[in-house]
Image (cartoon, rainbow, N blue to C red):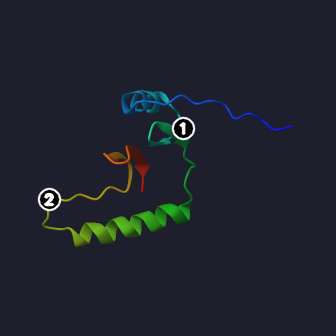
Amino acid sequence: MNAVPAIIPHLSHEEYLDLEEASPVKHEYVAGQIYAMTGTSDSHNFICLNIASFLRNQIKGTPCRVFMADVKASWHRPMRFITRM
């Protein structure tokens, strides 16, 4: 017997942001669909810190900024929000 996948409605980015604000679980938003994200490990955090530190040193003196985690970034094509590096 094949299971029928649940139908998940297409969400606007405003609906996603409202949902994410109230959710205890972080999600990634891609073209109207949301995907639960897993937690991180010590190794993952160590690697992210090293990359963020390297990038921060590379952009000194420019208007650019480096974030390591918990910042939503978006761009227009395709509409996508990512909350972690």
| Callout 1 amino acid | Val
Q: Position of residue 69 (x, y in %)?
A: 40, 52
- Which residue is label 2 attached to? 63
| Callout 2 amino acid | Pro
Q: Residue furthest right?
A: 1
Which residue: 42% across, 47% down? 83
Q: Secondary structure at mark 1?
A: loop
Mark carried by residue 38: none
Decide if residue 52 is on the left or right side of residue 22.
left
- Which residue is label 1 attached to? 25
Q: Position of residue 47 (x, y in %)?
A: 46, 68
Decide if residue 42 is on the left or right side of residue 64.
right
Q: Position of residue 10 (x, y in %)?
A: 49, 31
- Disc 2 from disc 1: Cα separation: 32 Å
Q: Position of residue 56 (x, y in %)?
A: 26, 66
Front residue of this view, candidates 19 and 7 = 7
Decide if residue 76 is on the left or right side of residue 10.
left
Is disc 1 surrounded by few (<14), some (14 to 19) or many (20+) residues within 10 Å? few
Q: Quadrant of the N terminus?
A: top right
Q: Secondary structure at mark 2?
A: loop
